[in-house]
Image (spheres, rainbow, N blue to C red):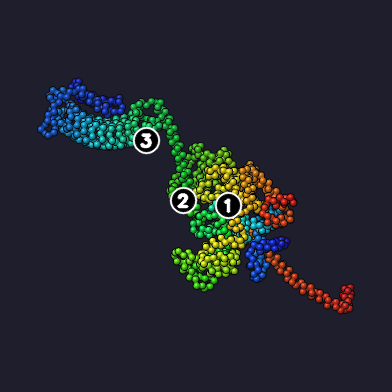
Amino acid sequence: MDWQVNCGLHLVIQTSSLPEKNKVEFKLHKETPSFPGRLLQHDLERNYSSRQGDHINLVSSSMPSFPILQRSSEEKILYSDRLTLERQKLTVCPIIDGEEHLRLLNFQHNFITRIQNISNLQRLIFLDLYDNQIEEISGLSTLRSLRVLLLGKNRIKKISNLENLKSLDVLDLHGNQISKIENVSHLCDLRVLNLARNLLSHVDNLNGLDSLTELNLRHNQITFVRDVDNLPCLQRLFLSFNNISTFESVCCLADSTSLSDITFDGNPIAQESWYKHTILQNMMQLRQLDMKRITEEERRMASVIAKKEEEKKRESQKQSLLKEKKRLTINNVARKWDLQQHRVTSIAANQDRKDSDSPSQDPGQVDGSTISAFPEETGSLDSALGNALQGLSVTDTHLVEVDGDTLSLYGSGALESLDRNWSVQTAGMVTTVSFTFIEFDEIVQVLPKLKIKFPNSLHLKFKETNLVMLQQFNALAQLRRIDQLTIDPQGNPVVSFTLWKYYVLFRLSHFSMQKINGTEVTQNDMIMAERLFGILAHVASSELPQYRLISILGDARKKQFRYLLETKGKKPGIVSEENNDSKRLVGENTNRATLNYTTRDFYNEKLEEIKEKKKFCKMYIEDLVKEATEINMKNEALQKLWPQMFIELVRDAVIEIRNKSSYMKLCLQQITDQK
Amino acid sequence: MATERAGTWLPEAGKLELGSCCGPRMLSPERLALTDYEYLAQRHVLTYMEDAVCQLLENKEDISQYGIARFFTEYFNSVCQGTHVLFREFSFIQATPHNRASFLRAFWRCFRTVGKNGDLLTMKEYHCLLQLLCPDFPLELTQKAARIVLMDDAMDCLMSFSDFLFAFQIQFYYSEFLESVAAIYQDLLSGKNPNTVIVPTSSSGQHRQRPALGEASMLEGVEASLFYQCLENLCDRHKYSCPPPALVKEVLSNVQRLTFYGFLVALSKHHGINQALGALPDKGDLMHDPAMDEELERLLAQVPGLVNSVTASSEASCLPSRTPPRVGSPWRPLHHARKVDAESDGSTEETDESET
């Protein structure tokens, strides 16, 4: 006898002793794809029933409950190597006597619960126990020649006791309750393994099955597959109707070089739009997918789509990397800001801000250690930047980002970017400028630059900028135009004031703003603003002494002038424009222009200067007043003395001329003396 | 020459101070013992002279364009009007009682509308308003004023404009006096008598320790009559401004005992003291300022076309047109004297132009 197994898995069992009937052939067909396991069974069944009658006598043995089987000698001669006990309502295996030469034994469709009494059939090659009630694989340890073991539709929970069946070629365990693949690694000759309709949740432990060509795992609950790449001969793998949802969970399939036929239908993965081309792209060796031949065209399409997909993925990865980087930088800036604020707030005693910020500090600290991993990637990333995020520059302390029409600045270092040479197009496109984690006083200093570099910026956003006073809004009046203002309450205590909106409207009325913090400005708002603060402006403009008016307005102009001098060398073209602006500034709103804002540092500087001058003035006035009081005192003293002096003088004169003749003589004498 | 000019201004500046200071002390014999210099210093004339020169130095380029005499005229006129404190540094604003009163008045005039609108504001917001007029106004003073209104608790509470303003007036105008009062009060509480007058109730410190039951609030603080004795003493020797002792007596005569903040509240609510101070109208008239209301109506009328009309009109009356006539116009002081009374600016403006 010899076994011939061809590619289509025709299993031919041929015995040489009988010319025709001895040839048993059964096919493991693939024509009906959904139930190959069943099909195998039906084939076998058909073969047997068509060729064998049921001429069997079951004689109850002396031993209790085990019937003893005996066949007539004719039958023995006719079917010397096979025995079919199909549909005999057997509940136990009968004792089979004198049939040691049996090669094929069929117990299909009985009620056998335990495999026993066959250990003497050592030449058995084919054992069919399909559709019984076996709960455990046992009693097979002596059947060393067994090649085909069919245990479908039983109650087996565990693969076990197959240790001695080293020649096993086909193992059918479909329709059982097996939840795990195990104890099969020694079956190095096994070519077909059917585990369909079991309770498997995953596939692994497949090492050692070096001859396995077909693995049927339909109708389980498999979520992932491993070790398939360790099966060197596997050609067909059936995974239909499982629970596979990602390609990653079956990615080992891509590493198998022998696999040519695979099914995934009935899995969640098969519903995905990327399913087909992903599988095709990753498993070039495949010839059939879900029972359909793969055409060259399909393969080409798949590779194109996959390439696109790959690119998209890389792009999105890059994006997310950038986003992550951005997030980290912002966190970093936020942490710095917090530290700085804590220093400041310890003076200002701004309790609530501290409270609200303390939770956000922890992630920041964690990020601090990871951010160092990014810088080396910056180079390659920047070169591949898309249009959506152009000109993104990241450093640890600040972040500048242009996204569409929005320029976002994080951290005070970002303000330096305004010095950069922005392209006219980019600069022209920017209509929204957002400041985060920057001291407002620092922003004030760059407002003139902002006005020149981003002439179209209409919407300013402030978040975490330490806006604490109404007067700080005065600084915004110097801009060219603002349509919208957004002051985030976070880090800007001024927003908690009831009057802040009105003050903004009042002070920036020359911009005729449209929105404040996203809310449309109404006529009523404007009237209310004027009602609340109009008098302040009136008092400021009409009651200030002239010299003060000039000096206050002058300060604003001087500031402009100073900036002019700075930029003159660089950009002569802009200077003339700037001149117009400063003229406009003065003309714009004189009665409000007196309400301006000088940053704290600048103000303190000014106070210091004033102190010096005061010292001098004090001394000067002191001297003057002393001099004046002295003169006054002398004057008073003189006034006091004068009447007495006058009387004395008169008295002297009278005494002198009392004796007229002697006086005359004296006078004459004097005249003669002179001559 | 400079001496002469300074001299010519002395009488006026002096007069101003005499007018705005409380009467009785002027005639006290010790005044006659002062030297001229001391007298000028005490009357704050020197302060203004110094400041005038300082301002002159500050803006010498601008001022030299329209004349030094013109500048001094304007300066002292604005001192008379009380507009000299607008947007000035805090050290100057608090330098003299007149400056303090002027600042109080300016604050009232500028933000009366806020009160009129009925908005209740927090201490911080009032502070912001103060800073609009004086950028370096210290938070501490505002806090102290708020404490008078809120009785030391819940500093984030909202206050009405008038409550805050009157409390602020007392705190700001009499701040040095109140510091001394606080010290005296503490001494009294702890049983020490700053005047070393022994009185039977000198054990008031122990009273304070008692739990506040029923009438215990009566026993809180210090005894009014004793307190008054100390304050009278203080007023006599205090060199800074104090409320008129007679009025303090009136405040204290109504109660037997009182706490420090109780005293401050009583002071801030006393209309006699407000009158004596002279910066603010009576509480009933606090929202009343017809001249300004008229001005406001005029401003409001311009709101719809705000950008166009205001710009145009303000440009017309802007600096360049105003400045030239003033140069070398020696008769200006007379007009300004008139301006002091009638606080309407626009009308004077036109007369000026027609004359020159």
**From the viewer's perspective, is residue A280 above or below residue B80?**
above
Could you tell me which residue is drawn at 36 percent across and 33 percent down? A268
> Is A663 on the left or on the right of A474, as rendered?
right
Mark 1 crowdedness (10 Å alpha carbons): few <14, some 14-19, many ≥20: some
Secondary element at image label 2:
helix
- Mark 2 residue type: Ser
Please tell me the numbered disc located at residue A356.
Answer: 2
Residue closer to the observer: A6 or A391: A391
> Is A433 on the left or on the right of A42, as rendered?
right
Residue B211, image x and y in percent?
Answer: 44, 65
> Is A61 on the left or on the right of A199, as rendered?
left
**Quarter-of-image position of residue B73:** bottom right
- For the residues labelled 1 and 3, the Cα–Cα distance comes to 70 Å
Mark 3 crowdedness (10 Å alpha carbons): few <14, some 14-19, many ≥20: some
Marked residue chain, label 3: A
- Mark 1 residue type: Lys
Please tell me the numbered disc located at residue B116.
Answer: 1
Residue closer to the observer: A637 or B198: B198
Secondary element at image label 1:
helix
Secondary element at image label 3:
loop
- For the residues labelled 2 and 3, the Cα–Cα distance comes to 42 Å
